[in-house]
């Protein structure tokens, strides 16, 4: 054998080993939601016409030889269990035919099995450099929000997703609101996890039919943490919307499996419980009219439904993500590339980090103390649901169409220019979305104050002794880059006011004209909330022909 032949064989061996290593890092015991699913072959879903009476419904079910398991009233859908041998009974008309031919039924379908879509991993297998999106030039904010959560700030935990989607900047606008509710229709939530303290609302368990949606698998707790784990509690990581409330809805069992009936009932429950956003990190390759009607029920109540695109490296439709009224979410990696196992296709509207995501877990005694790494579109979807929660928190009057438009129009365009099947409209950018969202708020902020004659030139207004004065001043409202966006002059009572300001950070600057001299600092730094008026932005002045100026430091930190 020649030296050249040996060298070529070594090269081929190295390439094959590298390919095997790459594959092993991608695939770690995935749970395929779009593998071949087994029908719950003796369970049907029947949608009845709205004028069907309870007695007529019961009569049809009796004729079929079945029993009603669940009645989903808002959808007029009954979940019915038939005898195990129903298909083999030869009576001339089987149960399915009886239901299909009934004048009371609008449609009949099998209640199929659906799965959550996670992939459990220990941690990231490489140290790929995060390709942070460029923070666009904006007048506000001027710095990212800093939180004290231990694992969030620990580089060994490799918590990359929040920075990748610009969350520390987005949180300047809002970190969420307890009035905004995110429903996690999943395997339940570990209610005792400290990351959710004080924010879990009453939920329901559609697997065991009780009011304790306890997570006995871990998927739902992980998903919930991504969307809404708490901030500034000195522990763990931080969810996208850390101040939002959480509605836990259990539709998946201890094997991370459920049925379409559970999912439909869970969506209806979440809507009726006041959810603003519903996350569905679950699904399958077969459509369900019942669940689609539940999604329409959510849309009719201005509730946004977000769903995972699936983990089978396939472009086959995956439901519920593939429905028009659902935001389908694909997964990206820590280097802003497409995660190799993520589904793709026409139904992908957005993408979000889904590879090696560190989040909450249902075992507080595990090696990470109640946290774990998982990969999958299950992890990408709650990033989008959390962002929707932030947008609703910023402006509760938004419609779901406006929220979708804000997220898609501000997403970072990856892959082919424009919308594509792998990234949708792009990977979400929370900062850009929230920055665009504040422009949809009415400019209702106000700033006001008084100019007074500072007779003793001490910079303190003694209102009983010193009078408001008309002086030659111009009051300017400036944004962070120094641009003047509004200005005012004092009226006959020395008062000034500027209205129609958007929420954000501003400088209020007084400019003295003529022989007017300021005896107070010339600048206030203010942080204005929507609808807020900041008053008492007062300036002391005096008149003088003397060639001197009064210097004073800038007033900082006015709220």
Image (cartoon, helix red, strand yellow):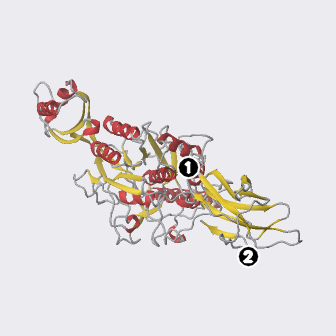
The one nearer the camera, 392 or 111, is 392
Counting the numbered discs, the total is: 2
Give the mark, 2 or 1, whose residue is nearer the N terminus: 1
Q: Dot 1 lies on which element?
A: loop
| Residue 547 placement (x, y as % from top left) | 89, 71
Q: Quadrant of residue 526?
A: bottom right
| Residue 265 placement (x, y as % from top left) | 29, 44
- Answer whether residue 6 is visible to the viewer in this image: no
Separation of residues labelled 2 and 1 (CA atoms): 55 Å
Q: Quadrant of residue 361?
A: bottom left
| Residue 549 placement (x, y as % from top left) | 83, 71
The one nearer the camera, 539 or 382, is 539
* Residue 260 to residue 204: above or below: above
* Residue 197 to residue 431: above or below: below
> Which label lies toward us, 2 or 1?
2
The dot on residue 427 is 1
Q: Quadrant of the C terminus?
A: bottom right
The dot on residue 458 is 2
Left or right placement of residue 192 versus residue 305 in this view: left
């Amino acid at each position: 054998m020649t030296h050249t032949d040996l060298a070529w064989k070594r090269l081929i061996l190295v390439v094959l080993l590298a390919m095997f290593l790459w594959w092993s890092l991608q695939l770690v015991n995935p749970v395929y939601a779009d593998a071949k699913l087994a029908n719950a072959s003796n369970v049907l879903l029947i949608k009845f016409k709205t004028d069907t009476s309870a007695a007529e419904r019961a009569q049809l079910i009796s004729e079929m030889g079945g029993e009603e398991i669940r009645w989903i009233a808002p959808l007029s859908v009954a979940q019915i269990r038939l005898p195990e041998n129903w298909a083999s009974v030869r009576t001339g008309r089987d149960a399915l035919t009886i239901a299909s031919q009934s004048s009371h039924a609008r449609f009949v379908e099998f209640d199929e099995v659906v799965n959550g879509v996670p992939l459990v991993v220990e941690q990231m297998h490489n140290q790929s450099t995060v390709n942070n999106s460029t923070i666009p030039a904006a007048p506000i904010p001027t710095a990212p929000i800093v939180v004290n959560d231990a694992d969030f700030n620990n580089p060994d935990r490799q918590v990359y997703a929040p920075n990748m989607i610009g969350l520390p900047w987005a949180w300047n606008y809002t970190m969420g609101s307890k009035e905004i509710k995110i429903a996690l229709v999943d395997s339940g939530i570990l209610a005792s996890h400290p990351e959710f303290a004080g924010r879990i609302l009453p939920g329901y368990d559609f697997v065991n039919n009780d009011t304790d949606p306890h997570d006995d698998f871990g998927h739902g707790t992980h998903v919930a943490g991504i969307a809404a784990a708490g901030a500034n509690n000195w522990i763990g990581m931080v969810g996208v919307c850390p101040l939002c409330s959480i509605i836990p809805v259990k539709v998946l069992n201890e094997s991370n499996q459920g049925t379409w009936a559970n999912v439909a009932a869970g969506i209806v429950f979440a809507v009726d419980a006041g959810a603003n956003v519903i996350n569905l990190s679950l699904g399958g390759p077969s459509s369900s009219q019942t669940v689609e009607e539940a999604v329409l029920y959510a849309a009719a109540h201005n509730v946004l439904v977000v769903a995972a695109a699936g983990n089978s490296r396939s472009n086959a439709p995956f439901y519920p993500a593939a429905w028009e009224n659902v935001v389908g979410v694909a997964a990206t990696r820590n280097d802003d590339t497409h995660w190799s196992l993520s589904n793709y296709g026409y139904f992908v509207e957005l993408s979000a980090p889904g590879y090696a995501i560190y989040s909450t877990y249902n075992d507080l005694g595990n090696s990470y103390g109640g946290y774990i790494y998982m990969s999958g579109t299950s992890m990408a979807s709650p990033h989008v649901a959390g962002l929707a929660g932030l947008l609703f928190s910023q402006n509760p009057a938004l419609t779901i169409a406006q929220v979708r438009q804000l997220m898609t129009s501000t997403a970072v365009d990856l892959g082919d220019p424009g919308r594509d099947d792998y990234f949708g409209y792009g990977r979400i950018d929370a900062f850009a979305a929230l920055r665009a969202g504040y422009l949809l708020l009415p400019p209702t902020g106000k700033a006001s104050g008084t100019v007074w004659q500072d007779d003793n030139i001490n910079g303190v207004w003694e209102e009983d002794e010193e009078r408001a004065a008309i002086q030659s001043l111009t009051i300017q409202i400036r944004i962070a880059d120094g641009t003047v966006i509004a200005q005012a002059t004092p009226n006959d009572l020395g008062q000034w006011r500027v209205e129609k300001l958007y929420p954000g950070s501003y400088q209020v600057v007084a400019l003295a004209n003529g022989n007017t001299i300021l005896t107070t600092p010339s600048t206030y730094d203010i942080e204005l909330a929507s609808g807020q008026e900041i008053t008492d932005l007062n300036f002391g002045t005096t008149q003088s022909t003397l060639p001197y100026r009064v210097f004073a430091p800038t007033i900082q930190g006015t709220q």
